[in-house]
Amino acid sequence: MILVVGAKGMLGQDLLRVLPGEVRGVDVDEIDITLPASVRRVLFTVRPRVIINCAAYTDVDGCETNEALAMRVNGEGVGHLAAASREIGATLVQLSTDYVFDGRKGGAYQEDDPVNPLSVYGRSKLLGEELARENPEHLIVRTQWLYGLGGRNFVETMLALAVEKRELRVVNDQIGSPTWTVDLALAISTLLDCGCRGTYHATNAGSCSWLSFAEAIFTAAGVSVQLRPQTTAELGRPAPRPAFSALDNCRLVHDTGLELERWDEALRTYLEKRREGGRNG
Ligand SMILES: NC(=O)C1=CN([C@@H]2O[C@H](COP(=O)(O)OP(=O)(O)OC[C@H]3O[C@@H](n4cnc5c(N)ncnc54)[C@H](OP(=O)(O)O)[C@@H]3O)[C@@H](O)[C@H]2O)C=CC1
Ligand SMILES: Cc1cn([C@H]2C[C@H](O)[C@@H](COP(=O)(O)OP(=O)(O)O[C@H]3O[C@@H](C)C(=O)[C@@H](O)[C@H]3O)O2)c(=O)[nH]c1=O
């Protein structure tokens, strides 16, 4: 049986839809990963074969002013899951992020490239990676720029802002790969099927800036809005973010044969599903 922790979050909801076989989801109302006793109670009762940890504090700017909370949830909480999963002989799948890199490589990051997080969120997720490795049966999946039906994300933010404003300013000096949570869930499922362990990168193919992503969102959704470029410095958000943090998926392709679709194709499918669900631009 697979236990998804953080099951009410954006990725957690799609994992519950995509994973085959017996799958159970728990969230903070049933398990608080910052409390070892809570983690042990759930894992020793449920006794899953695999635990996929999607629970996290994902407000990147919020982490800057709540460092202790970020470290507890994204770092130490993973350590509690690693210790208990090891004791029951289960595999721990830990989600991580492009923000463990500084974005200065000038090319897509491979799994073994040196890490150097710029933000509190990035440092807390890196601690989570390190502690996940304390269970030898671990699978760390780094991904980025997620969007899906079940959570707050850039696509939904852009579509909501376009209702209120005629002109939007979006940064054009950060490059990455927007990734649909359904495609990521498929990648996680495939990695597990193939018995993969260790660290993997999994994103939709191709890359773009947040500005190009916004342009693609409005074109595909048929929404007319004036988009203007701005720099990250002009935007002045609290958390520093990497300038170029596309992730190289070669290890995933080599070990599983799975090639995820391009980010712009995935975006179009997402927007169709969204419309089918009764949501408009
Ligand atoms: N979103 C993105 O763009 C990216 C995300 N990731 C990683 O992917 C994973 C999933 O992300 P995403 O689906 O966006 O996350 P969400 O923020 O949508 O979901 C996280 C879930 O974890 C829950 N949670 C928070 N604290 C605890 C706790 N102490 N114990 C148990 N559950 C808790 C949250 O509950 P509540 O909402 O009540 O706090 C929420 O339901 C995370 O590890 C994230 O770091 C990686 C790269 C990009
Ligand atoms: C809303 C908005 C954002 N932006 C910028 C801010 C930021 O640099 C970028 C994206 O904004 P967001 O707040 O959606 O993104 P952000 O919180 O940085 O997203 C990150 O989340 C964490 C959890 C991850 O792990 C990362 O991979 C990444 O997905 O767009 C604009 O330029 N204009 C706008 O109107």
Image (cartoon, rainbow, N blue to C red):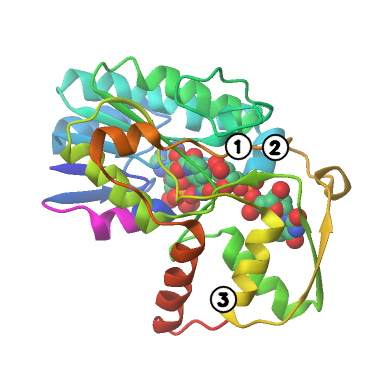
Task: Determine which of the numbered discs, if any, sits on residue 64 in the image.
Answer: none
Q: Amino acid at mark 1?
A: Ser
Query: What is the spatial separation of the Cα atoms under label 1 and label 3, in whole angstroms?
Result: 24 Å
User: Looking at numbered disc 2 in the image, what kind of residue is underneath it?
Assistant: Arg
Q: Residue at coordinates 50% horizontally, 21% vertically from top-left?
A: 127
Closest to the camera, between mark 2 and mark 3, is 3
Residue 2, percent from left and from top: 18, 42
Tell me the SS state at disc 1: loop
- How many other residues sit within 10 Å of disc 2, few (<14), some (14-19) or many (≥20)? many
Q: Which residue is mark 2?
A: 241
**Along the horizontal axis of the image, is 140 left or right of 69?**
left
Give the amino acid type for the residue marked by disc 3 in the picture. Ala
At label 3, counting other C-alpha atoms closer than 10 Å, the crowd grade (few under 14, some 14-19, many 20 or more) is: some
Res. 28 image quadrant: top left
Cβ atoms at labels 1 and 2 below 8 Å apart:
yes
Q: Can you tell me whether the CB of the residue at mark 2 lies under 8 Å from the nearest atom of ligand 2?
A: yes
Q: Is residue 116 left or right of residue 8?
A: right
Quadrant in which the C terminus is drawn: bottom right
- Identify residue for label 1: 245
Chain part drawn in magenta:
14-21
